[in-house]
Amino acid sequence: MFCSLFMAEHNISRKGFSMSQQPSGRFSGRGIFYFTVAIIVISFTLVGSFARAVKKADDDQFWEFTAMFSEVYNEIQNRYVDEVEPKKLFEGALQGMFLTLDPHSQYMDPDSYSQLEKDTEGAFSGVGLHITIRDGVLTVIAPIPGSPAAHAGVRPWDRIVEIDGKKTEGITILEAVKKLTGPAGTTVTIKVYREGEPDFLTFTLVRKNIKIESVYYKMLDDKIGYVRIAKFSDATSRDLRKAIEFFKEKNAKGIILDLRFNAGGLLKEAIDVSDLFLPKGKVIVSTKGRIKSQNQEFRSENDPITDLPMIVLVNKASASASEIVAGALKDHKRAILVGVKGSRTYGKGSVQTIEEISHSFEKDENGNYRPAAIRLTTARYYTPSGKSIDKIGITPDIAVELPKNHEADILRHGLLGDPPMEEDEVTSTPSRFTWKNEKGAEGTTLSQSQKPTSPEDEDGTEEPALEGSAVKQKNEETSAGEPLKIIPLDRTLFPDAEIEGEAKKKEEKKAKRNGEFVDYQLEAARRLMRDY
């Protein structure tokens, strides 16, 4: 959740900052903040800059609509049964205009805009959710690993139907953020619909201060460098370069880049991260919009800093900037994408521009207008092969079949760099309440007749399997005696993929006996890398 929740690309252009192009076509200026979080925005001053931006051919129609708006406003002010503040009417009109657009476009009042600026710093107080509006329903992209929401068991693609007892039907992301954020130590209760569950699930979450660092890395014991990008912030590419130099000093034989549960970040940093691994001159991503200035192509500008083989870990909560990096490395065959059976990446392929507006409906103590902003979808982005991933996502090269609820266990356990779970932070209980006749996003009832999964079914004893459409399949016994199927789809990096010998099996058995957590997707990637 940036703002404790979210996902979406933001380009914030503020007074004193500008969005410009260098000869390379890259954005420059510290005022450009792209980050993935689902927040919403809009922009215009009704008579000033907005009127000047309207095409000449539309001038007459624009003024006709303005006159109609003025007439309706006067009728409400003169005849409505109760007195209404002009601010509420105008702000409601602004928000209503954006409801006709996509969920990522929105007007941001001064409070929301101020919160957005704080969230770009990577520190906030909330429950730790990236959220969006998907098919008209408030949807979890992913909990932040190690956060209160993750510890409670909230999962990617959960649909939030109530917040503190109030239905979320028709809610905007901005409104949801306000409800879910708050001072550390306070609680918020959410009710979610989860596909396959017979009833809604209720989670009571204790808000806490959350700070997200960008890059975490370490050497694994098999000479494999592991680096996790939690979000794409303004220092990500710099810190990733340090990690790679560290791996080279330690004579690493390969790199595993973990983009799971990464809902995005700065577009510029996604480009710079890709640039670290690709040959000079390769297309990283292109954007296409309705106006010419939004049609841009971004290429790598430098030689790669390493030629070590790479595996990129993704899942259905890898979104936006994460998908830019994954798509570039996949299309140029620089890395193998290892994902999860039955899922692609999230599919956030649009670009939003955030523009500060000087006038708002509120003034500060000095009588000056507090800045507000609008957020507007201005382009879609495309991978080097020319594919749009918007609402589609990226298919991994190799898919790992995970044990039931394994990704939820990862969220509870946390990835590298996440804080440990505090037992008194969260509580969660299944709710017996159901809305029998109400419909979900795809028209399914928000109540299922299936039997709930029992705790005995969730003990994590299943072993994962790797799947793909491929060349050669080898079955070996895993530590639990189940087949682990590894199918290499790219023989350039991995000519063969075999399970390591008995020593590794004993190591895994020992870990299970000692109750240690095993990240099976990471383990599958390590096995592939060891066989290189």
Image: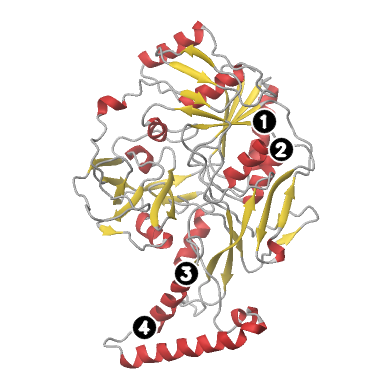
Instruction: Indicate the position of residue 335 as horizontal and vertical percent values.
Output: 65, 31
Report the mark closest to the observer, 1 or 2: 2
- Left or right: 476, with 496 as reference point: left
> Residue 276: which disc?
2
The residue tagged 4 is 85
Give the quadrant of residue 136: bottom left
As shown in the figure, which amino acid type bears the numbered disc 3?
Thr
Residue sitting nearer the eye, 110 or 42: 42
Residue reaching furthest to the left: 432
The residue tagged 1 is 244
- Left or right: 195, with 419 as reference point: left
N-term-proximal mark, 2 vs 4: 4
Determine the secondary structure under disc 1. Answer: helix
Give the quadrant of residue 478: top left
Determine the secondary structure under disc 3. Answer: loop
N-term-proximal mark, 1 vs 2: 1
Residue reaching furthest to the bottom: 78
Residue 108 in sight: no
Q: CA distance from mark 4 to mark 1?
A: 57 Å
The crowding category of the residue bearing disc 4, from other C-alpha atoms within 10 Å (few below 14, some 14 to 19, many at least 20), is few
Disc 1 vs disc 2: Cβ atoms closer than 8 Å? yes
Q: Quadrant of the C terminus?
A: top right
Q: CA distance from mark 3 to mark 2?
A: 40 Å
Disc 4 vs disc 1: Cβ atoms closer than 8 Å? no
Q: Residue at x 65, y 65 (%)?
A: 290
The residue tagged 3 is 100
Residue sitting nearer the eye, 179 or 196: 196
Instruction: Indicate the position of residue 93 as horizontal and vertical percent values.
Output: 44, 77
Residue sitting nearer the eye, 159 or 219: 159
